Image (cartoon, helix red, strand yellow):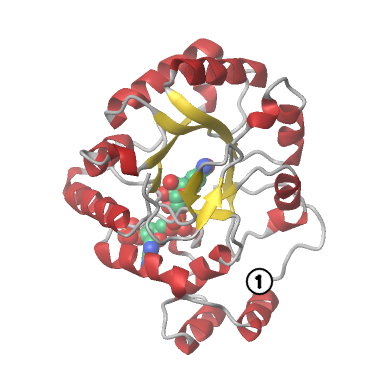
């Protein structure tokens, strides 16, 4: 896989992935924007953002991804997710087969349990192991798992092979800093930060805008630069226009100053104590 000149994050296996990837939630929801979505993902690949995150939940997003990666599968690191209601042993295997078909690929690089559901974790885990042995998935991980869920997972045989935990993290959602983030860091489990610009809700923030003006950047770029300054954090903004993709890639070139960080800390204070994981 080519990771171009992007900073990289090393997975527990030693494999390297680009720190900045691409999300796909709300892609594939209607024919009208489809061409633009495919073009945006392709441009992202050209710019080195070769980690693409999708899910069986996201309407036809897996089909959009299939179109975008056509002819360049080997460059890409594809992440998709099984829904909790499908996470029994048999249903996980079936869900994975459906995702492989929709993605038009013979393998998923990282397969995540989207959030905790009723089925026992042992069942999902045994399906993940079977899928790995069959070569259908290369790694497995979880999403929206708080410290208690991670402890339960790690207590299971092979549970510590978890390759990532994908969670909500941005300036307005800093809760993980007081618990989950250090827990994962101590055990070498990379965090994938989703909704890094809070689905666009951070764009009009006054303090972010002030910092952006100083850097001749956009507010979205400052929100991304703030998450990206942590070198072990994988960040997966979703962008469906070429302009947004270019901007997001350029956020990697922004270096926030001590003054910027102090202002952002005042406006978006870090948590003082552990709090339950938030999700979207
Ligand atoms: N595991 C989970 O439970 C979970 C939950 C939520 C999200 N996710 C994953 O994380 C990805 C990212 O999160 P998200 O989609 O929720 O939110 P996000 O990436 O924080 O925000 C996406 C929104 O921001 C806009 N945007 C992107 N770049 C921009 C820029 N440079 N300037 C202005 N606006 C910009 C996008 O507009 P355009 O589309 O018009 O470009 C879109 O409306 C998802 O797509 C999904 O893959 C996972």
- Cβ(mark 1) to ligand 1 < 8 Å? no
User: Mark 1 — residue?
Assistant: 268
Q: Residue 214: image x %, image y %?
A: 49, 89
Q: Is residue 193 visible?
A: no
Q: Residue 18: image x %, image y %?
A: 46, 53
**Residue drawn at the location 71% of the way across and 70% of the way down:** 269
Seen in the picture, residue 119 relative to 18 is either above or below; the reply is above
Q: Residue 167: image x %, image y %?
A: 59, 47
Which quarter of the picture shows residue 163? top right
Q: Residue 84: image x %, image y %?
A: 54, 26
**Residue drawn at the location 68% of the way across and 44% of the way down:** 188
Seen in the picture, residue 135 relative to 62 is either above or below; the reply is above
**Residue drawn at the location 58% of the way across and 37% of the way down:** 13
Q: Is residue 173 left or right of residue 127?
A: right
Q: Secondary structure at mark 1?
A: loop
- Quadrant (top left, top right, bottom left, bottom right) of the N terminus: top left
Residue at the outermost right position: 273
Which quarter of the picture shows residue 149? top right
Q: Nearer the viewer, residue 100 or 218?
A: 100
Q: Is residue 17 visible?
A: yes
Q: Is residue 175 left or right of residue 236?
A: right
């Amino acid at each position: 896989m080519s990771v171009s000149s992007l900073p990289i994050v090393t997975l527990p296996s030693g494999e390297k992935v680009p720190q900045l990837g691409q999300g796909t939630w709300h892609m594939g929801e209607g024919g009208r924007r489809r061409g633009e979505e495919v073009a945006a993902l392709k441009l992202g690949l050209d710019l080195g953002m070769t980690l693409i995150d999708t899910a069986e939940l996201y309407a036809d997003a897996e089909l959009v991804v299939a179109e975008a990666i056509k002819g360049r599968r080997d460059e890409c690191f594809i992440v998709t997710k099984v829904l909790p209601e499908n996470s029994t042993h048999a249903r996980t295997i079936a869900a994975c087969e459906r995702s492989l078909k929709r993605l038009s690929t013979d393998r998923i690089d990282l397969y995540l349990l989207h959030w905790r559901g009723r089925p026992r974790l042992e069942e999902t885990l045994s399906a993940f192991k079977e899928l790995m042995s069959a070569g259908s998935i290369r790694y497995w991980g979880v999403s929206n798992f708080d410290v208690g869920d991670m402890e339960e997972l790690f207590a299971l045989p092979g549970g510590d092979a978890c390759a990532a935990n994908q969670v909500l993290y941005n300036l307005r959602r800093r809760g993980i800093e007081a618990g989950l983030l250090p827990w994962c860091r101590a055990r070498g489990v990379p965090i994938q930060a989703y909704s890094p610009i809070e689905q666009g809700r951070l764009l009009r923030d006054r303090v972010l805008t002030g910092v952006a003006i100083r850097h001749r950047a956009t507010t979205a770029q400052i929100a991304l630069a703030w998450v990206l300054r942590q070198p072990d954090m994988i960040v997966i903004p979703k962008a469906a226009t070429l302009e947004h993709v270019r901007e997001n890639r350029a956020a990697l070139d922004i270096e926030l100053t001590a003054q910027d960080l102090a202002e952002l800390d005042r406006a978006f204070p870090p948590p003082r104590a552990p709090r339950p994981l938030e999700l979207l």
